């Protein structure tokens, strides 16, 4: 059943107090969409109870985006009003908190449009978001918000009310809201993820080798790449959890040392469209061939945005002990799907996962950051040391590192 008003407030408090860790006196930027009003309002209320100075709500309407894609001149589709990026940078300058609500409100709304045009309009993502993340000037988080259309997509055999009940039940579970103390449950899980990151760091791998059906991919790492679990700190020392739920450990690849072919293990849901059966071939770090059962042109368009868009900026490992993967559900929401399976991201790197300045300069830079899932129990991950030794990392979805 849907969350009661009391449960909704409990969820909002977990988001504000634990995940974003809003501080008294902070401005809170809350990104949402039409159809997400109940959770939007609950989070705003929780933020003010926490002592927020102001809650700045920005709502993005994908139906307006469709109108642009249908009718706007071709040469205007990549235009982003400068104040969009200026706002993000200002949030960093003022040390604000940021909370985003994921989950599709109109799945497939853009699927009948020219995928090349769709790929040119990145909104609501703006490039400055990556800069603020790398500068670590905001404490931020992204959390799932159920919508009627999303519930119907996942549970088409149920009526509207039952479908929403089922989706809420899944989100209760993956967000650990079914625990007596969700925050304590999350701290226990985060400790396990941090431990995995520390074991990976201790090995100082030169590369990772992914092998599975349709996949034979070697991802080189920078000499000072570090593995991070999803417990971040701002430059001012504010701890926060950027994804709730979170089940990953991640690092920065060498953008010039990625070779082989990789087949996505889950569909990639972009705003209003879905890329299915994605297969990408890399040579010398660059995606040189992109094929898909559906949506290939949208992906090719994204990778043509700039020089770094066709190179990797993230590699992330996810084990089978999390709560999302065992549900065996494609959520069509990157927040959930990327925390169900190991993944890589084309585009901008998280530079704070690189320890040395020289290596940091080599980290990939781009106006995009697009994750896609490449892990499953059938995909084995092996670490390669600088001496060429091969060390099992993930086997059948479980950590193999001692």
Image (cartoon, rainbow, N blue to C red):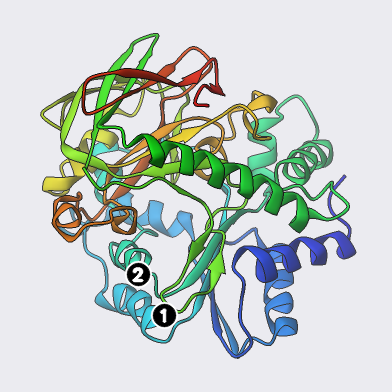
Residue 315 placement, left or right of 103: left
Q: Of residues 112 and 322, which is closer to you in this image?
A: 322
Q: Secondary structure at mark 2?
A: helix
Q: Is residue 345 above or below residue 191?
A: above
* Residues at circles 2 and 1 in contact by the CB criterion of under 8 Å: yes
Residue 325 placement, left or right of 242: right
Q: Secondary structure at mark 1?
A: helix
How far across and down, in percent of the image, does residue 165 sit?
82, 41
Numbered label attached to residue 32: none
Q: Is residue 244 above or below residue 89?
A: above
Label 1 crowd bin: few (<14), some (14–19), many (20+), radius 10 Å: many
Q: Of residues 79 and 255, which is closer to you in this image?
A: 255
Q: Is residue 97 above or below residue 246?
A: below
Q: CA distance from mark 2 to mark 1?
A: 8 Å
Residue 181 placement, left or right of 328: right
Label 2 crowd bin: few (<14), some (14–19), many (20+), radius 10 Å: some
How far across and down, in percent of the image, does residue 197 sit?
47, 42
Residue 346 placement, left or right of 107: left
Residue sitting at x 47%, y 37%: 199
The residue that mark 1 highlights is: 91
In terms of sequence position, does the residue under pointer 2 or pointer 1 come before the other? 1
Which quadrant, please, contains the N terminus?
Answer: top right
**Residue 109 in sight here:** no
**Residue 298 in sight here:** yes
How far across and down, in percent of the image, does residue 343 sit?
41, 33
Residue sitting at x 51%, y 30%: 341
Numbered label attached to residue 132: 2
Residue sitting at x 26%, y 51%: 348
Task: Please tell me in which quadrant of the rendered image residue 37 appears.
Answer: bottom right
């Amino acid at each position: 059943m849907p969350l009661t008003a009391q449960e909704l407030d409990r969820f909002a408090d977990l988001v504000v107090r634990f995940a974003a860790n809003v501080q008294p006196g902070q401005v809170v930027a809350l990104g949402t969409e039409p159809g997400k009003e109940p959770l939007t309002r609950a989070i705003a209320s929780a933020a003010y109870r926490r002592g927020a100075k102001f809650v700045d709500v920005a709502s993005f309407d994908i139906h307006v985006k469709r109108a642009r894609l249908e009718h706007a001149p071709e040469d205007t589709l990549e235009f982003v009003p400068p104040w969009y990026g200026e706002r993000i940078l200002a949030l960093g300058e003022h040390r604000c908190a940021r909370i985003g609500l994921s989950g599709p409100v109109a799945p497939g709304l853009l699927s009948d449009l020219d995928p090349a045009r769709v790929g040119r309009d990145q909104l609501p993502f703006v490039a400055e978001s990556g800069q603020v993340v790398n500068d670590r000037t905001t404490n931020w988080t992204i959390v799932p918000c159920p919508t009627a259309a999303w519930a119907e997509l996942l549970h088409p055999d149920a009526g509207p009310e039952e479908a929403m009940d089922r989706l809420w039940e899944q989100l209760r579970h993956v967000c650990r809201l079914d625990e007596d103390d969700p925050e304590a449950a999350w701290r226990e899980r985060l400790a396990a993820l941090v431990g995995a990151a520390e074991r990976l760091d201790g090995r100082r791998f030169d590369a990772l080798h992914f092998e599975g059906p349709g996949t034979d991919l070697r991802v080189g790492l920078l000499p000072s790449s570090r593995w991070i679990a999803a417990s971040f700190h701002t430059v001012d020392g504010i701890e926060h959890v950027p994804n709730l739920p979170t089940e990953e450990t991640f690092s920065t690849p060498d953008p010039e040392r990625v070779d082989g072919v990789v087949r996505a293990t889950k569909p990639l849901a972009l705003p209003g469209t879905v890329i299915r059966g994605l297969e990408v071939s890399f040579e010398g770090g660059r995606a040189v061939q992109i094929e898909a059962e559906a949506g290939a042109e949208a992906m090719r368009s994204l990778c043509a945005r700039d020089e770094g868009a066709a190179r990797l900026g993230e590699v992330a490992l996810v084990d089978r002990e999390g709560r999302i993967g065992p549900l065996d559900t494609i959520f069509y929401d990157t927040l959930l799907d990327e925390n169900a399976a190991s993944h890589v991201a084309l585009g901008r790197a998280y530079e704070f996962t690189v320890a040395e300045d020289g290596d940091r300069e080599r980290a990939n830079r781009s106006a995009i950051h697009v994750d896609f899932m490449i892990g499953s129990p059938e995909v084995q991950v092996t670490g390669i040391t600088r001496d060429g030794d091969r060390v099992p990392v993930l086997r059948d979805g479980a950590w193999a590192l001692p």
